[in-house]
Amino acid sequence: MIPLNFAGTGRPAASWDEIDPIENQISRTLLCQWLNLPRSVSYYQPQLGKPGARPSQVTMKLDGSWVDNQLVVNSIRQLLDVEFNALGYEYITYELKKEYIINKKKVYRLMQEYNLLLGKVIRPTRKREFVKFRRIESTKPLEYLCWDIKYVWVEGERRNYYLLSVIDVYSRKILDWLFKGSIRQIDLINLFRRINRSHQLKGVILRNDNGSQFIAHSVRNFLKSSEIKQEFTHVATPEENSYIEAFHSILEHDVIERNVFDSYYEAKEMLGRYFSHYNNHRLHRSIGFITPQQKWEEAQIIYDTTAAAAAFSENLSS
């Protein structure tokens, strides 16, 4: 039974003994008339807890049997426990419907309760290291890298795609790139795994802005474990990331402004051709009118010569 309160009437608590036996038999309006009280002072007593029905503790399977929600949570964990996973609750719901009768609201509630949601808001807890010098003075390849994301409009699909480029500051060479409809944290991690297979990145300093992908915990933790030092530009200071900004301006001038893309695949194919042209054929004034690849190889020759001379000198002295 839901008890009645009578606000501001001064009636003693004992009056409930008079009302309780007949409360379910007559209307509240009539009760108030008998007690000579205005109807407006009668209201429901608030109950403890959240309003509405309690969430169900079981879920039906397609075969008609019922299972505890904990088994559903275990199924969710199995779906998430795969390499390169980045599944949200809607994708999880789609997979669970192959076994359970369940909607996305319940899946969201269970994933939220067990802290399994991806999370849309990123709040970094570890202190970020901001750049100390606005301009980078690099003396060799793989000393400083910069990366950033640029929008590329595809007219045929009436939408933007994301281009992520990684540049070596010393040689201006583009080490790798991504072009996708969305760039997730795992995409950034896999990109650097790929670069690390070709080049030893231990000790490299990586500069970026404060975009959500770059400040993500998973990305920062991966870079730290790979011994890549990540530094952040100050807010609203694109000049602190000028090398990658300059490259994207060149790309805008040479490719994007001169072409109308009908599809994602057309844009990606042309970008791939341009990256090859930029690294191997386009002369770069700031590095002495040679190509980034020539600058890269030139530094490698100097390094090999210096290392050989040092080894020869050491052999003579021993």
Image (cartoon, rainbow, N blue to C red):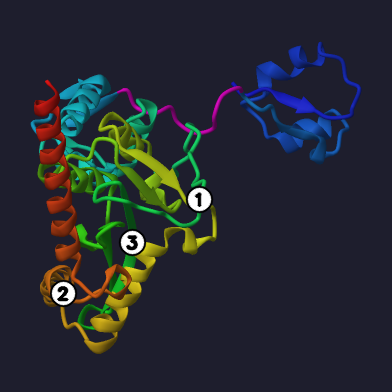
Q: Give neighbour class at mark 3: few <14, some 14-19, many 20+ (Cα, 10 Å).
A: many
Image position, residue 64 (x, y; %): 12, 30
User: Amino acid under label 2?
Assistant: Tyr
Region rendered in magenta? 48-57
Q: Could you tell me residue 32's position as x and y percent?
A: 80, 33
Q: Which type of secondary structure does the marked residue at label 2 adopt?
A: helix
Q: Nearer the viewer, mark 3 or mark 2?
A: 2
Q: Which residue is mark 2?
A: 274
Visible residue check, residue 119: no
| Secondary structure type for disc 1 | loop
Residue 133 - label: 1
Q: Is residue 153 above or below residue 316?
A: below
Tell which of 240 and 38 is nearer to you.
Answer: 240
Residue 84 in view: yes
The rendered magenta stretch, by its main secondary structure, is classed as loop
The amino acid type found where label 1 is placed reads: Phe
Dot 2 or dot 1: first in sequence order is 1
The Cα atoms of the two marked residues, 1 and 3, are separated by: 22 Å
- Residue 256 at what x, y percent from top left? 26, 81
Q: Tell me which residue sits at (66%, 28%) in the image.
A: 46
Q: Residue furthest right?
A: 10
